[in-house]
Image: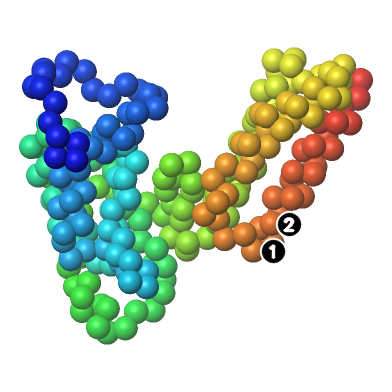
């Protein structure tokens, strides 16, 4: 790290699943992949910032304006995966095209002339209309509706589990009800909201569900 090397040792296991240091350690291990992708002419530009890859542990998100360049990024990943003895799973790899119905200029269409199948490790990867990355749902229309619906289902599921375990009943102390809601239900509802475009409609939908769930928890009555 930073030009300093430890003594050589033989590795017998990968990074610990769920370990706090694991994402950082894995990022250091695959740094060659990230450097090569960053050096390439890939990605998109937000103002003057070039964005081509987002990495968290072994979750890599490759970004490109054309399929041809995206295929070149997949080839970089395949090359370094072989070199580093990492087997990336094509069956768990998907790609999505945002704003696929948007009308493009002739110049954009010429740049994106290559439309063959995308491959990883010489295997085809699937195109999807929606996907999840680090718990956040995306779709082709770049709409937040999928994520909001997923959060609603997850929050209702968290409420149902507390009831099924009889942790939350009509006899539960009101203060404990509030604690359970704040600790086990509300975090599930608002998970991943930071990157969401919180329009007035979206905010009203989340607030309404929040109020309804809290009201239900606090007003549970004996049958």
**Residue at coordinates 18% horizontally, 66% vertically from top-left?**
41
The extreme bottom residue here reads: 106
Q: What x and y, as percent, mark residue 6?
A: 14, 26
Is residue 70 among what the camera can see?
yes
In the rendered view, tell whether residue 207 sits above or below residue 135. Answer: below
Q: What x and y, as percent, mark residue 82?
A: 9, 37
Q: Split into 4 quadrants, where in the image is the C terminus?
A: top right
The image quadrant that residue 117 belongs to is: bottom left
Q: How crowded is the residue under tag 1: few (<14 C-alpha within 10 Å), some, or many (20+)? A: few
Q: Is residue 205 left or right of residue 196?
A: right
Label 2, on which residue? Answer: 204
In the rendered view, tell whether residue 114 sits above or below residue 118. Answer: below
Q: How crowded is the residue under tag 2: few (<14 C-alpha within 10 Å), some, or many (20+)? A: few
* Disc 1 element: helix
**Residue at coordinates 77% horizontally, 50% vertically from top-left?**
208
In the rendered view, tell whether residue 75 sits above or below residue 158. Answer: below
The image quadrant that residue 168 belongs to is: top right
Scheme of colours in the image: rainbow
**Residue at coordinates 68% horizontally, 33% vertically from top-left?**
185
Q: What x and y, as percent, mark residue 124?
A: 20, 47
Q: What number of labels is visible?
A: 2
Q: Is residue 134 left or right of residue 222?
A: left
Q: Is residue 198 left or right of residue 22?
A: right
Label 1, on which residue? Answer: 200
Q: What x and y, as percent, mark residue 29?
A: 20, 35
Q: Split into 4 quadrants, where in the image is the N terminus?
A: top left
* Disc 2 element: helix
Q: Are marks 1 and 2 in contact (CB under 8 Å)?
A: yes
Q: CA distance from mark 1 to mark 2?
A: 6 Å
Is residue 88 among what the camera can see?
no
In the rendered view, tell whether residue 184 sits above or below residue 171. Answer: below
- Residue 148 is marked as none
């Amino acid at each position: 790290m930073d030009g300093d090397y430890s003594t050589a040792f033989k590795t017998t296991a990968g990074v610990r699943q769920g370990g706090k240091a694991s994402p950082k350690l894995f990022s250091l291990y695959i740094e060659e992949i990230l450097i090569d992708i960053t050096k390439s002419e890939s990605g998109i530009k937000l103002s003057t910032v070039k964005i081509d890859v987002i990495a968290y542990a072994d979750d890599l998100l490759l970004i490109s304006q054309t399929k041809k360049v995206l295929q070149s990024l997949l080839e970089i990943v395949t090359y370094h995966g072989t070199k580093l003895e990492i087997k990336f799973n094509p069956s768990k790899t998907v790609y999505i095209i945002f704003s696929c119905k948007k009308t493009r200029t002739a110049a954009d269409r010429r740049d994106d002339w290559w439309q063959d199948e995308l491959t990883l490790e010489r295997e085809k990867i699937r195109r999807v209309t929606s996907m999840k990355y680090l718990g956040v749902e995306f779709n082709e229309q770049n709409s937040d509706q999928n994520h909001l619906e997923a959060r609603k289902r997850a929050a209702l599921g968290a409420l149902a589990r507390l009831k099924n375990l009889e942790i939350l009943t009509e006899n539960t102390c009101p203060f404990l009800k509030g604690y359970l809601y704040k600790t086990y239900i509300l975090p599930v509802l608002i998970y991943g909201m930071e990157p969401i475009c919180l329009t007035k409609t979206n905010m009203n939908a989340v607030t309404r569900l929040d109020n309804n769930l809290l009201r239900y928890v606090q007003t549970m009555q004996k049958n």
